[in-house]
Amino acid sequence: MPKVRQKLFHAISLLAVFSMALAACAPAATATQAPQAGPKKLEIFSWWTNGGEATGLNKMFDIYKAKNADVEIVNATVAGGAGTNAKTVLKTRLQGGQPPDSWQVHAGKELTSYVDAGQMEPLTQFFKDQGFDKVMPKLLLDQITYKGEIWSVPVNVHRSNILWYNKKVFADNGLTPPKTFDDFFTVAEALKAKGLTPLAVGGADKFETPHLFESVLLGTFGPADYAKLFQPGANWGDPRVDQAVETLNKMLGYSNSDRSALGWAAAMQLMLEGKAGMTIMGDWAHGYALSKGLKPDVDYGWAAAPGNDGVFMWLSDSFGLAKGAPNPEQARAWLAVCGSKDGQDAFNPAKGSIPARTDADKSLYDVYLQYSIDAFGKETLAPSIVHGAAAPEAYMLAYGNALNVFSSDLDAKTLKQALIDSVKEIK
Ligand code: GAL
């Protein structure tokens, strides 16, 4: 054997002996994983990153930490309103068998897609043990019950169809919040004449125009016929769809042209700063304004979106338990906070939503939220499309894509056809 080769052979043999010796010293092969070192963990997944959203979430975390000091919370957020980005990330994680312990999910049809995919644990017994079934309204219980089980714990009720307006701009120009679509266009003309953007609309979060359109649909169809749009085989060829698209087109004509560059919060900000007169957004926008130190009924006012008077378009955020959750015990303790009176009364006043529980301490809620609690109790209810209440996730995605395309190309014919095609996703 040549010298170099001989040396190499010698070195390899030495290495082999050394690694065998190492293996012999190592503890017996571990059939089961040794318990993880370090603190106990809890991973919560959501898209709550904006002012108001993040504040509310942290308030619930504070309550959790006070009760579970030994648990480290991993706050897994993915920015992007309405979860447009978060849901994609979540899907990849779930398909890859890497679920967070608990994730934000809208009550209603959105929830059913995760259940159908076998990604959630039923919570029926837990819900009863905690007594949550005694303190939540039937509307919500129905939305979280599917195939005979309860699947998530609602933390709130949000309202999607609110028109927010700048009080000073309206007062300076002698304007009152519009009730009908015609009123809206009169007010919009007046604001435009003053060189202001009448309606601030976002687009960067990829849900803002779809969001605006759901209130236009509701205002055009009325609550009874709007509800029929989400039944299998619904008739989206109805001429009222064309009418709604025309109204939306006209509204967008009064909005900022940089829609696609602004998220919902930036659009709200334009209105709060008085650069725009109005914006139409869910009441998480109220939470955002609060986080900026602004006051409802002083700095900004609200009314139902045009044509939506007397109808509360609702949605509800909830949290579930992942099948195969890495930390199920910690996750259950989290869900106990989500459904508790303390948890809800800390979270909702900052989030801009009303509690899912009927026994909340109303004195903790501001003038807008008191209005909303009252309205939820007496107005006609309609489910939101974009925020998971009305239709399955696949439909919401098809509807959302169609409206986002329209926001840039304003092609009514293509939109109508896409809406008709999307009906196959309503199940
Ligand atoms: C909604 C969600 C709200 C709020 C909003 C904007 O889908 O239900 O809680 O977070 O998106 O991000």
Image: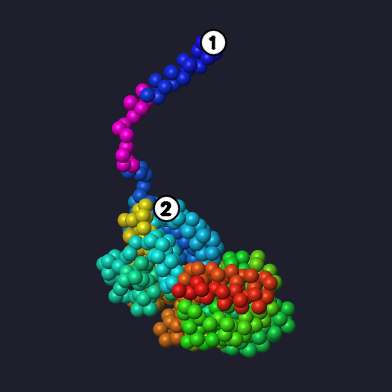
Instruction: Say above or below: 374 vs 207.
Output: below
| The one of 76 and 29 positioned closer to us in this rendering | 29
Confirm if mark 1 falls within 8 A of ligand 1.
no
What is the x, y in percent for residue 417? 61, 76
Q: Can residue 242 be seen in this view?
A: yes
The residue positioned farthest toward the left in the image shown: 129
Residue type marked 2 = Gly
Q: In which quarter of the image is residue 380?
A: bottom left
Image point (35%, 44%), residue name: 36
Image point (33%, 56%), residue name: 328
Point out the tag, 1 or 2, that comes first from the N-terminus.
Answer: 1
Q: Which stretch did the figure color magenta?
A: 21-34
Asked if residue 183 lies left or right of residue 79, the reply is right
Residue type marked 1 = Pro
| The one of 260 and 365 positioned closer to us in this rendering | 260
Check the image and tell me how it is coloured: rainbow
Measured in 3D between alpha carbons, the distance from the residue under mark 1 to the one under mark 2, in whole angstroms, is 53 Å
Confirm if mark 2 falls within 8 A of ligand 1.
no
Q: Name the residue under label 1.
A: 2
Q: Main structural element of the magenta stretch: helix, strand or loop?
A: loop
Q: In which quarter of the image is residue 400?
A: bottom right
| The one of 273 and 12 positioned closer to us in this rendering | 12
What is the x, y in percent for residue 393? 48, 68
Image point (36%, 67%), residue name: 151
Q: Quadrant of residue 26?
A: top left
Q: Name the residue under label 2.
A: 97
Image point (43%, 18%), residue name: 14
Q: Is residue 313 visible?
A: no
What is the x, y in percent for residue 273? 63, 72
For label 1, count other residues whose C-alpha is less than 10 Å away and answer few (under 14), some (14-19) or many (20+).
Answer: few
Q: What element carries label 2?
A: loop
- Residue 409 in magenta? no
